[in-house]
Image (tube, rainbow, N blue to C red):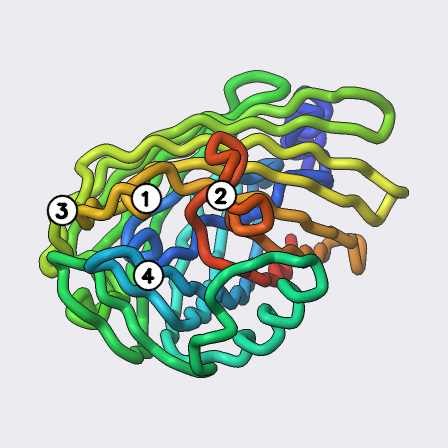
Amino acid sequence: MRAAVIILACFPFLAQAQGPIETRNHQAASLAFLRLDPRGDLLAPGQRSLSIALSDANSLRFEGPFREDGETQRLSVRYGRGFSRGEWSIEVPFLARNGGFMDPLIRSFHDLFGISNFRAGIPYGRVEEDLGPSGSFGSATGLGDIVGTVSRPLGPQALWTAALKLPTGNAGELLGSGGVDFGSSLFSRWKLGPRWSLFGQAGFVLQGKPSRLKGARSFVDQESVAVAYRLNSRDSWTVQWQSEPSAIETGGQFVDGPHRQLSLGFARRTAKSETLQAYFCEDGDFLNFRVPALVNIAPDFTIGLRWTRRF
């Protein structure tokens, strides 16, 4: 107990509940590989955590041989434990790819904000995942690739994470890559004022050779920037930018370009040791893909919830 108090006193970043949105780009090909989500504070020594996250991403994009129309749900369960000056965690994901329910909702959302695309001519509830040289994938449900991570502090405002992904998902159904991935990332926080905080991430992933996907990149860089505003002792809002290259190269100039998304999230401390985070992510269609440095390729719309309990 005394050790935990000392750690929290020496590392104010670790004691903050306010943090970035723990999400990733939910493109189907990207989900097959390791990615390191933006994250906040570390666990204290001996402290444990259980995190359950549910996301739903709807994608619609046609370019040459690349055709994507469908929805992917991802349920992940993550268990972590703190040790002296660090923590380890294991995440087990489950994936389902299907026609989903968001097609009419997204079309109404686009109509409301005057976003123009070709959704009006596409039937609802379709499942098509044609990744060019990698071939086509249909509906699928099952276990994804399990990820283990180790994190350590690098001072009062920063930490370092290393992660390893094992090929436990069915690569033939695009529930995993069929290869072993390794990644590492640096995370930092800067206090901008009494209620404002800035979070940054820079990292990389070495994508192991997949068993089914063609044209996979061997090296993928990851960056994210988040600005969080604390409303009170329990609630905060976060705006977040995330960037990475495409996981695979399909031959389509646009879809092989930078993958970037913007997210808006709300977090509430529902109890002394529990936090609920809700968010949605957008691709570049609301700017007609004219500002790729800001927002570009991602699922058309992603919604998510994450519940975390520390004990």
Nearer-N-terminus badge (4/2): 4
Q: Which residue is mark 2?
A: 289
Q: First in sequence: mark 1 or mark 3? A: 3
Q: Nearer the viewer, mark 4 or mark 3?
A: 4
Spatial CA span between label 3 and label 2: 24 Å
What whole-number distance in Å separates the C-alpha atoms at marks 4 and 3?
18 Å
x, y (%) of residue 143? 31, 71
Position above or below: 97 against 261: below
Element on which disc 4 rests:
strand
Q: Earlier in the sequence, mark 3 or mark 2?
A: 3
Tell me the element at label 1: loop
Kind of residue sitting beneath label 3: Gly
Q: Amino acid at mark 2?
A: Phe
Assess disc 2: are there few (<14), some (14-19) or many (≥20) residues with their C-alpha within 10 Å of its C-alpha: some
- Nearer-N-terminus badge (4/3): 4
Foreground residue among 96 and 63: 63
Residue positioned 73% across, 24% down in the render: 9
Residue at mark 3: 215
Q: Are marks 4 and 3 in contact (CB under 8 Å)?
A: no
Residue linked to disc 1: 254
* Location of residue 127 by image quarter: bottom left
Res. 175 in view: yes
**In this view of the protein, which residue sits in the foreground, 121 or 6?**
121
Pointer 4 with pointer 1, Cβ within 8 A: no
Q: Position of residue 284 (x, y in %)?
A: 52, 46
Circle 3: element type: loop
> In the rendered image, which residue does mark 4 sit on?
62
Residue depicted at 37% across the width and 70% down the height: 69
